[in-house]
Image: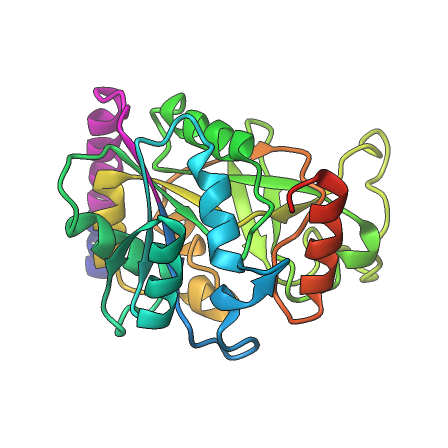
Amino acid sequence: MRGFAGLTLVLAGGVAILLKWKKRLLGRKRLRVIGVIPARFQSARFPGKPLVSILGKPMVVHTWEQACKATTLQKVVVATDDERIASACRKAGAEVVMTSSECPNGTVRCHEAVTKLPGDYDVVINIQGDEPLIEPEIIDDTVRALQNSPDCVYSTACTPLDHERVEQRTRVKCILDRHGHAIYFSRGVLPANKDGAVRPFPAPFQQQPYLLHLGLACFDRAFLAEYCRMAPTPLMLMEDLEQLKVLENGYKIKVIVVEHNAHGVDEPEDVAVIEQKMREEGLT
């Protein structure tokens, strides 16, 4: 009985925290938005990836240029700990915030960058530097999704994923509830079935697609600070996906589904694919 009473107190405490956040969010409009592009030179699979040349221009600069076209952002900055990246971005005209080399991930780097800037922002959107073809309209729609969802602390975007790519571990998949909230993210096949096959959804849901998570993470600013104080969670560590810590702590993530034909640059061979798409879309 003593153990049960202790568990009841813990659960009650968790519910109280969530209710506090919901009350706080419902009273705020979250109008001022900053876009942050975290960029680090070191990468296990692709060292120096932000500076890889795509049609003669560093990839991170392409991403910054796309982000600057978004109409919901009052400011766009690049956050890095590497002077080579900083120099390339400044040369292109980007504002750069130098951050610690000890940042464990892009989310913490975004938080540190915003704390070093003047201004009081309500929303921080983490725009992955390896998405040089991200459409500014998708950035805007992701921001508005959070602004229009007062019970959520985070929003992001997904796009339909071809069946032949579902098993690729570099592609992060997502599943949603019937209200557009994230249920789970995984590098594995998601959703899976008992025979492990990738196939159309069963009747009457054959038009339901597998969903690829895009490199956008839009945070309520106050929650971002809270998120960075939270301890790592089991599923976050198992999947190596930062957004799972949001779900594991009981918070809601709003997801929009968009049409986005280009994926990010995960490996060197992706560069040629991106260059071809840029030529096709006249983004040279």
Can see residue 255? no
Q: How many marks?
A: 0
Give residue 275's quadrant in the image: bottom right
Residue 284 image offset from top left, x and y in percent: 65, 47
Relative placement, left or right, of 131 versus 39 is right
Relative placement, left or right, of 7 versus 53 is left
Tell me the residue at 43%/77% (across/down). Answer: 42
What colour-coding does the image apply? Answer: rainbow
Tell me the residue at 72%/43% (across/down). Answer: 261
Closer to the camera in the image, 139 or 87: 87
Q: Main secondary structure of the magenta part?
A: helix
**Image height check: is 276 above or below 140?**
below
**Image height check: is 204 above or below 37?**
above
Q: Is residue 216 on the magenta stretch? A: no
Q: Quadrant of the N terminus?
A: bottom left
Tell me the residue at 64%/65% (across/down). Answer: 170
Closer to the camera in the image, 104 or 210: 104
Q: Is residue 18 on the magenta stretch? A: yes
Can see residue 185? yes
Residue 68 image offset from top left, x and y in percent: 42, 37
Relative placement, left or right, of 262 versus 41 is right
User: Which range is magenta?
Assistant: 12-35
Residue 2 image offset from top left, x and y in percent: 19, 59
**Image height check: is 169 above or below 93?**
below
Tell me the residue at 31%/57% (across/down). Answer: 79
Residue 140 image offset from top left, x and y in percent: 47, 29
